[in-house]
Image: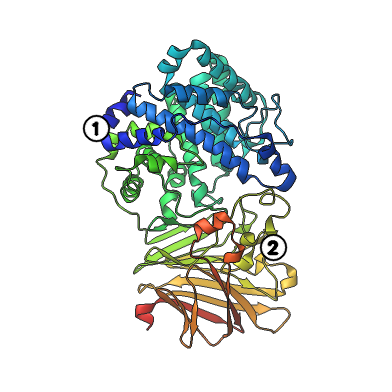
Amino acid sequence: MDAVRRNLALWPDVRESYIRYGEQYAGKPWLSPSARLFSEFKTNGNRTRYEAATFAKRRQLAALVMAEVAEGKGRFMGDIIDGLMSTLEETWWGLPAHYGTKIMLPDDQNVDLFNAETAGLVAWTKRALAKQLEEFSPLLMKRIDTEMERRILVPALEHDHWWKRAGMNWNPWICSNWAVSVTECEHDTLRADRAFSQIEAAMKCFVDAYPDDGGCDEGPTYWDRAAASMYDCILSLEGRGKRVELSPKLLRMASYCYSTYIADGYCLNFADSHGNRLVQQPNVMYVIGVMTGDVTMQEFAAYVAREKGFWSDASGMYDKSGNYPTLGRELVFLSMLDKFSKVEPREPQMADNWLPRLQIFSARRNGMFVAMKGGHNDESHNHNDVGSFVVYDGGKPVLVDPGVGEYTSQTFGKGRYDIWTMQSAYHNLPKINNCDQKNGKRYAARNVKYRKGALEMDIAGAYPDSAGVKRWTRKVSIDRRGIVTIDDSYELSRGNAPQQLMLLSAVEPKVDESGILLGSCRLRMNNAVVDVKVEPLADKFDPMMQSMWPDGLWRIVLSVKGRSVIKVIKEAEGS
């Protein structure tokens, strides 16, 4: 912690921000979530009320620990000790969505994401404040180790958990917290060696399953708990003296965080993305940028820090660094603050990007940005969205992906595709003979052709046989002036009625004789478009969707007969 305290002394505004943040929680009671809240997931499918309560308690602890690290006077230690004891006395540390029974059982210490995440918070608290905790009572340190042993060290090591072989975020997210828990709380050398051997094997499974292009099919907002958590594991491995060779694939997995960046804080939000402006965190981007030697990522981290006001309100960013503040990442980042302060801020503005495994392309011309995805409808955190696209102008959303609302029992259950945000009818896609896309790996794009500034594919295969479509070729392109063109042509095996094209707008559409005005842009359409309807979607919003799209979303329904060509043009150029 010496480097952290030295750096905080050099930036008093940063230091004071953490202290003020902790002061908000000083003297407040420690409230443990109730059994009734836990049981709600089984009784009515609600998971957010319990999550809010347990995350609030962890936020309280993480805030107080950072305040004590920053100030170093012992003023917050009483609250921290009470919070630690309250946390150690909880029956289980995870979430009801990841538990088998209606109430928690002391003997069932299932290792889920937030059992592991809480273990990581406790381990980092022990590392940061070991001397103070020991001075209060050696019995507290022993209690920490005992609880960590029964909650994560033994169950993670001795059980053949499915996530150890998974190619998605559970694997590195849990392993990164398991690793720091072993480092701080495992006193059996042989058991520690076994644990890190399993962690290395799990990381190999994760990397082997990851697309070669480095893309995260769970969506960019999961990157910081997928590839970024893998880099947390690498830090722990290197802390044990193991050198990890960073292959080109590992480097691409890191750079994904800015290759999917749009502008003004927005990133692509395909798949389950709760909010497409909440991804960029300097405390993880800068550290990984240093580990990989990626100057673009380091500059991106500095840009986000400047834009979000890190140097005057560091705790404001810390507060949003996870479901609750990620203590370990913040401490590692602060140990490098002196070097970070010298990095020139720069927003990444990639002109072209292509992820061939995920089949996601993006291009930027003259202030306009377009992206499109192919792939299949059995991706992790899948939405039925093969062939969908987004358009942004000057970093502002025009035609969008809706993202996803609050998680419930339905989200990962049989009724997932009854949720409107998962359906192709609420993405920028056609409804063919009144049929939507189907979920499953066989429902996929074919004949995918990429060149800079354009992506073409046949999306007919993403629809069921009942759609009666032999071919639906979609080409999305952007020219040097920034004009985006969506060109759809099709062949049907049945039916001759007009088909429907859905477009989701983040700007209230205004239909006139010249097309459709969407704020700064205009849609111009050829004669294949025979009818236009506009439907507001705000009445479908839950609180999560409302926070993402406070101005609302609108669905434009275009009836088309034959090949349709739609151009998205900046209004100044289209007038």
Mark 2 → mark 1, Cα distance in angstroms: 57 Å
Give the residue type that dot 1 points to.
Leu
Residue 171, by quadrant, is top right
In screen coordinates, is 98 left or right of 293? Answer: right
Residue at (51%, 23%) from the top-left corner? 82
Give the residue type that dot 2 points to.
Lys
In screen coordinates, is 360 left or right of 12? Answer: right
The disc placed on residue 301 is none
Give the quarter of the figure containing the C terminus. bottom left
Residue at (61%, 63%) from the top-left corner? 540
Placement of 141 over or under 51, stated as above or below: above
In screen coordinates, is 372 left or right of 519? Answer: right
x%, y% of residue 80?
46, 25
x%, y% of residue 52?
57, 42
Placement of 36 over or under 515, stated as above or below: above
x%, y% of residue 498?
65, 83
x%, y% of residue 340?
29, 39
Residue 407 visible (yes or no) = yes
Give the quarter of the figure containing the N terminus. top left
Give the residue pinned by disc 2.
Answer: 438
Foreground residue, 300 or 543? 543
Q: Label 2 crowding class (10 Å Cα cut-off): few <14, some 14-19, many 20+?
A: many
What secondary structure is found at the residue carrying circle 2?
Answer: loop
Foreground residue, 205 or 365? 365
Foreground residue, 314 or 416? 314
The disc placed on residue 10 is 1
What secondary structure is found at the residue carrying circle 1?
Answer: helix
Which is more N-terminal, label 1 or label 2?
A: 1
Q: How is the image coloured?
A: rainbow
